Amino acid sequence: MTLWDSLARDGGRPSGALSDAVRTVSLTALESGSTLGGRLESLRGRSVVLAIPDQLAASLAMIELDGVARRMVLCPAGVAPEHTSHVARTAEADAWVSGAGGEPPSVPVPVHVEACREPQPCAVTRGGGATEWVLLTSGTTGAPKLVVHNLASLLSAFAGCAEELVPGRVWSTFYDVRRYGGLQILLRALLGGSLVLSSPGEPVPSFLDRVAAGGVTHLSGTPSHWRQAVMSGAAQRCAPAYVRLSGEIADQGILDALRAAFPRATVAHAFASTEAGVAFEIRDGKAGFPVTWAGLSVQGVEIDVSRGTLRLRSPGNAQRYLGDALALKDEDGFVNTGDRLELREGRYHFVGRAGGIINVGGLKVHPEEVEAVINAHPAVRMSLVSARRNPISGAVVAADVVLERPVAEGDDAAGASLRQDILAACRDKLAPYKVPAVIHFVPSLKMSASGKLVRPDA
């Protein structure tokens, strides 16, 4: 079954619509129209790089290409130009779909199609074969890996789950829908509602105004997205019934902040990755996940923590890396996410990535563990912990901190007092070698195109 078959299931008509800052497109427009200028057949059986900057047009092209293209590579906004040729070569691309009047492909391909912003009337033949969906990993440096899914693995988190696909819901997300987290929301919206899309560079208050105007009921983003929303004061502009966090560690501070901002909403945090798929969703308002889930199959996902990191085996796992000798799954068929865990008070808490450790005189510090303590301080909105070189210990812990209310310029005494208060909280919760040696107050922190904090080691 193709994505289009799923939209028009049981001989019915597709329902719902996609909208962005300037237009709304009903899915019924694809019944007798195409965004591909009548050139859909020229893409049949090909490996297609989908490089449309516009999210709405790209979403419509995904619906059209599933079952037609042999392989569809989702190229999100923000991919460095030097990496697009790597993506095309690795995917063995022989077709390229850009936006109307967009840049030509960076590598020679036999077919180049410019997609329209909205469907144009024409005869179309949907489906015909299976399509590989290829997503890019979201690291902030280095060439991205290409991760191969199929439609079944992408839909596995909610296939057959009536609760996930209730008609009439209006979804929205801070994510780019060409990345795994955003694609999950797009698919939910296509199969059970409508979707309000974000726009690149759109100020958070403007986006949330559109969320409110669009009657959005279900809204998702990374913890960093949500910290920006709460910090800007714009969160109160909308009233979703369901708020979801994923993509980064959801510490208790941000969960409590969202509970306060949306007292009537279900606040859920989910673990998912491009390679492993969706693992689980937690709705009890607490950071981490219950110890009783380890070693079990939860929501169809087998969870293993025996090696100190989270390993997952499920129908939602990707099939493989494309053009990469690195194995995606281990000898037991699990995907090792590389996310380290610590057991505290009956729950496993995420403490950071295996590759992001700060070495302080031979002792290991996970930046995210320190950030969780700093972020719990009532004066702090968000923080980023990193290593600073030290001639004695090799490295010390340093923290950049964004405050709820900036200290007045020149008020050194207030700044010093607040630093000492934050350090006191760290000393109370952390081992001495984990306590920051340096705290800088900064106006903002850099976020990647995928909505995550940009870390020096990423």
Image (tube, helix red, strand yellow):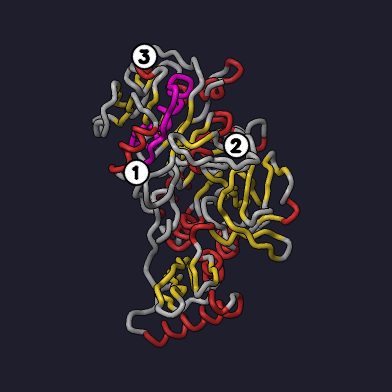
Separation of marks 1 and 3 at Cα, in angstroms: 32 Å
Question: Could you tell me which residue is drawn at 28 percent across and 21 percent down?
Answer: 110
Label 2: few (<14), some (14–19) or many (≥20) C-alpha neighbours in 10 Å: many
Cα–Cα span, label 3 and label 2: 35 Å
Where residue 275 sits in the image (x, y, percent)? 53, 41
Question: What residue is shown with label 1?
Answer: 79
Task: Answer whether labels 1 and 2 touch (C-beta < 8 Å).
Answer: no
| Element type where label 3 sits in the image | loop
| Earlier residue among tags 3 and 2 | 3
| Mark positioned earlier in the residue sequence (1 or 3) | 1
Q: Secondary structure at mark 1?
A: loop
Q: Amino acid at mark 3?
A: Cys
Specify the label residue 122 is tagged with.
3
Considering every residue shown, the one lying at the far bottom of the view is: 413
> Mark 1: few, some, or many residues within 10 Å (few <14, many ≥20)?
some
Cβ atoms under marks 1 and 3 closer than 8 Å: no
Q: Is residue 370 visible?
A: yes
Name which quarter of the figure residue 116 lies in.
Answer: top left
**Which residue type carries mark 1?**
Val
| Foreground label between 3 and 2 | 2
Q: Which residue is mark 2?
A: 316
Q: Is residue 277 magenta?
A: no
Q: Secondary structure at mark 2?
A: loop
Region rendered in magenta: 50-79
Q: Amino acid at mark 2?
A: Gly
Please tell me which residue is depicted at 53% across the width and 64% down the height of the picture.
Answer: 368
Residue 121 is left or right of residue 13, and the answer is left
Is 62 included in the stretch rendered in magenta?
yes
Give the percent coordinates (x, y) of residue 441: 40, 74
- Say which quarter of the image contains residue 19: top left
